[in-house]
Image: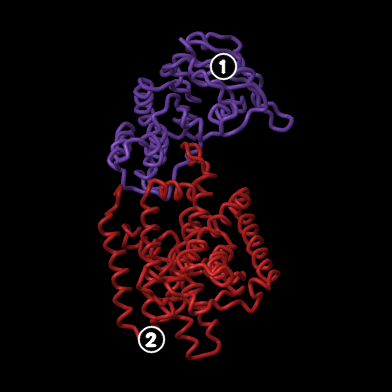
Amino acid sequence: MSEASPVKAYALHAGVIAFLFVLSFVLPAYYHGLLARILVLAVFAMGYNMLFGYVGLLSLGHAMFFSVGLYGAGLAVIHLGWSVPLAFLGGIACGAALAVVIGLLALRTTGVAFMIVTMMFAQVFYLVILYFASWTGGDQGMVVPQPARVLTFGATSLDLTDPTVRYMTALVLFSVVLLITLAIVRSRYGRVLVAIRENEERTRMLGYNTFSNKLAAIVVSGAICAASGAAYALLFGYVGSSFASVQYSILPLLWVLLGGAATTLGPLIGTLFMYYVTDVTSAYTSAYLLIVGIALIALVLFFPKGILGSLRQRWLGWLP
Amino acid sequence: MTPLLTTKGLSRDFGGLRAVDNVDFTLMPGEIRAVIGPNGAGKTTFVSLLSGRIRPSGGMIVFDGADITELPEYARVRKGIAYTFQITSIYANLSVYANVALPAQLTQRHGHSPSAVQGAVMDALERVGLADQAAMLAGQLSYGHQRLLEVAMGLALKPRLLILDEPTQGLADSEIDNFIALVREIAASATVLLIEHNMPVVMQLADRITVFNMGSILAEGTPEAVRQNAAVQEAYLGSAP
């Protein structure tokens, strides 16, 4: 029981990554592009899951971490002429720094107050983007010019606008974050996070500084979400304020709930599911949101722990 | 011999109520000390002040020669003060193993191999007799076993002072006998501070007894001396008819 079947877990994750790799050569162009986008957004969901799933902190402001990465990377390329890797790292650094500040302030609250405080900070961030329209492009957003979206390694260069390069870059980011999440969850630190979720006072009385552990979790979560945003700006070339709106704080929550909170692969499943249900139903009717809503209600009724969470509860106890 | 723990003028107010009133208390290393007293005497508040769950309104606490009055609870745990809850406070949704792994990994910080943690966990579970149930969800254990799991979590911290808050509450008589043996075994390696209502348990286990009443210490001494003390009889055991 103790260190439940690590081999199985690692094999499953390697299998998923390999499957996604093969899909790149099989999928038709439209779905190929869509899946690249889903992989990047699944990273966003994984970052959200880190905090919500494992630590049990429900934030309604994660759009700010995604968009600080988005703008951090995008604006660095547009205004400062930074190279792609530098802009990407800059985006992550912005996310981590913002997370430290937000964490120090928001962690003074819990429960509903934490939700409201994070949401307020995200709204402030959104309004700041609109206010400084001359740099951010306001509600129009900005396009990251195509020539700037090239990765150069000495003589070779990779054009991130090329569909295959874009897909593979997204897959690399997804895989790295997935394996980082898996490693954290299985580590001693991951055990402390889950303990905080289950019973914070008990965890303090077992010798853990729960505040600093939660702060670290917010920083990891914020950095992962910012990495997703930075990758989005560099791969898809658009930086827009809609990504900072409250909708993008709710979406990762839905993705994670759908796929299964506190499962490593749940965020991918949830993001995939939402996108494909939306995609398929919108082909048939303009009232597709109604069908998405019904699908969500059905899931909550029959799979309250999300898809993977329910599978784990009933059959696959070893699932990380 | 220097005391393991002393308090000087320790007080705690809740609004207008003085729950712990100017308590001077000394605990020697290696002893089993029982704290008894009527309901509302301030026993749980007193040990909560020692463990750091609540802050004193006044006075100081010295542990192993160092002033720990201002230390947060998690830092006191790391110094060796472990507290087991009066109302069972385990991680019901996690396995029995995981419940004990959390405190065990704290003390096995330097043995970085997972097997060091595993060894410490199984050791603690064996001492309380729960090794067979390691894979079960803690919430599925019987109440008596959950109490034992509480103790195992305390043991895994390898404490120098283990505070047990009404550990036999809700246990069956047969379980209580085992529990007494367990506490004796624990006392070989740690100092035990025990809040207990069950008088036979107190009389069998305690080297010394501290009697609380109205937030202050009414009497202190060996079980025999406390039993003979007229003030204690009146306040706690009831005055003679």
- Disc 2: CA contacts within 10 A as few (<14), some (14-19) or many (>=20): few
Q: Colour of chain A?
A: red
Q: Amino acid at mark 2?
A: Ala
Q: Nearer the viewer, residue A154 or B157?
A: A154
Secondary structure type for disc 2? helix
Q: Is residue A298 above or below residue A13?
A: below
Q: Nearer the viewer, residue B67 or A83?
A: A83
Badge number at residue A29: 2
On the image, the x and y values in percent for residue B75 come to 51, 33
Disc 1: which residue? B25
Give the alpha-carbon distance from disc 2 to disc 1, as whole Å.
77 Å
* For discs 2 and 1, the disc positioned in front in the rendered view: 2
Chain letter for the residue marked with disc 2 in the picture? A
Instruction: Give the residue displayed 46% in from the left and 55% down from the top.
Output: A54
Q: Nearer the viewer, residue A37 or B16?
A: A37
Task: Indicate left or right for B123 with A307 as reference.
Answer: left
